[in-house]
Image (tube, rainbow, N blue to C red):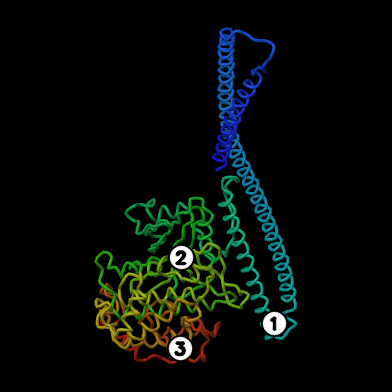
Amino acid sequence: MSDELDYSDSLSLHEDSSTEHSGSRSELLSSLSVDLKMPPTEHVQSPAPHRDLEDMDFDADLQDRLQKAFDEIVKLKKENLEESCQRQQVEKELLVVRKKAKKLQDHLLKELQHSKGFEEARAADQRLIQKLKKDIELLKIQRDEYLEKFHQASDQILLQPLGAAKEAHEQDKHEIETLREGISQLKIHRDEYLAKFQEKNKPKLAPVQDIAVRYSEGHTQFTLDQLKLATENFSELLKIGEGGYGRVYKGTICDTAVAIKILRHNENLQGLLQFQREVLILTKVRHPHLVNLLGACDEVSALVYDYLPNGSLEDRLSCKGNTPALTWQVRTRIIGEICSALIFLHSHKPKPIVHGDLKPSNILLDADLVSKLGDFGIARFLVPSDTSTMVHLTDHPIGTMFYSDPEYMAHGELTQGSDVYSFGIIILRLLTGRHPREIVKRVEDAMINDELHTIIDRSAGEWPFVQVQQLARIAMRCAAEKRRRRADLVTDVWPVVETMMKNASLSACPSTSSSIQDESSVPHYFLCPILQKVMKNPHIAADGFTYEAEAIEEWLEAHDTSPMTNLPLRNCVTIPNSALRLVIQEHLQRGP
């Protein structure tokens, strides 16, 4: 726009100059005409022919002078125009140079601000690292103080009454365990932060080669050579699974079938942390419906579990390998088993545990189709928040599409309600056999239109419709969009599914309770939930479950909670289950 204005000004200037020159030419002609007029003389008289000749000479001379003046004016006008064009070109080039200079200045300013921001972030990171180190040192000091108090109490134990000494010992033991857990969690948080810091500053910082996170030593350490021997050097023929997490092999250790999961972290700290977190959690908790960790190999980040021959619940829902569909009795029991496992994790002391990635592919099935919850790589211990809610906060939510809690994915707040949402989706899948995409909306529409019977998975058999309605209502409450509207597993879900489990067990026969059992196998309800062996002397506890008498008595000596749900028992009385004992004896006498 400025260039157009400059050019218009130049044209105006040229026009003014032309007008000026034109005026000057007229004035010049008038001046010459006036100057050349001769005043009349009275005394001198010249002959007329001579005067005419003089006038002609004068006109010719005047004409020449006018022509030269006109040529001079044209020349000046042309020079003025050329000079104006040159000046206009120079101004355009100057404008381009100024624009480039402005862009360069803005770029330099942005670079300066970015560099300043990076330095500030790095300084903040360093301050946080120092704070974490100080916190760890403080916890170590507190641990030493507790240990000192513990030793002092031990020295005085003979001088105290037996009951008081035992109580003090238990209290000190609990405090020490709590402190150890706190230290382990702080170290995990520290290494998670270092992993993020390394990823963010990867171009500028050398990669961290090794971060040693210590965890509980309550598991067996296997060597790489032992795992190679167990899997025939990781033979492809023994590979039973592979995914983004890594590879799974079937192996044999000490004549026992095992599953060996080798995590693929490629020197990625996040993968290493998931491996260490899974070891940390599975060495602290034991439950009949959690996978049993036999040991680990730190050399290759490998985990060794009991081998579960029926694969995952996802495999069975999709009938992988042409396996028979799960019956409604088995599906009902699996719902109850996973519910009891979640209640157990959520009531863990001193800090509740949230699985965080509950889905059918992480639920494994043993030879009797008893479910075991596995893959605790992204599980978390919860801590109280500002609103007194137990929560784990993160800037980078990790989960599986269609199963992850929407509020967790949106706000990074992982709570017990996050597992409840995933559990609701799993119930709907077991009911309908459909893909989880929009499954909540489909079931909701079917319930509104009184068409629930049209979307039930008929391959599961004749599912009692009253039970179908109850499970659908429970699932819809669990999978509510808002966390505060979701069902409570202890008060809302467990009382319903516990009754369903018992009814399903009574209606199932050995041939239907496990559709792919061998002839020599036994019904799952013959097995003690604690020992996982056929019961010889079954007893019913206050939680409604039946256990081997010796196993439940040993459990009750150290606990006042249910082995299945981790909820407080009304009493510690057990009642012989004579009817089940008779059925077990007849089955064993009849033989396979």
> Between disc 1 and disc 2, whose residue precedes?
1
Which residue is at 52% across, 57% downward? 270
Which amino acid type is marked by label 2? Gly
Residue 41 x/y as whole percent: 68, 15
Of the two numbered discs 1 and 3 in the rendering, the one whose residue sits closer to the viewer: 3
Disc 1 to disc 2, C-alpha distance: 47 Å
Q: Which residue is mark 1?
A: 165
**Quadrant placement of the C terminus:** bottom left
Of the two numbered discs 1 and 2 in the rendering, the one whose residue sits closer to the viewer: 2
Q: Based on the displayed image, in which of its 4 quarters is residue 387 positioned?
A: bottom right
Foreground of the two, 341 or 412: 412
Which residue is at 65% across, 49% downward? 113
Label 3: how many Cα within 10 Å (few below 14, some 14–19, many 20+)? many
Is 25 left, or right, of 516 in this rendering? right
On residue 399, the disc is 2
Label 1: how many Cα within 10 Å (few below 14, some 14–19, many 20+)? some
Of the two numbered discs 3 and 2 in the rendering, the one whose residue sits closer to the viewer: 2
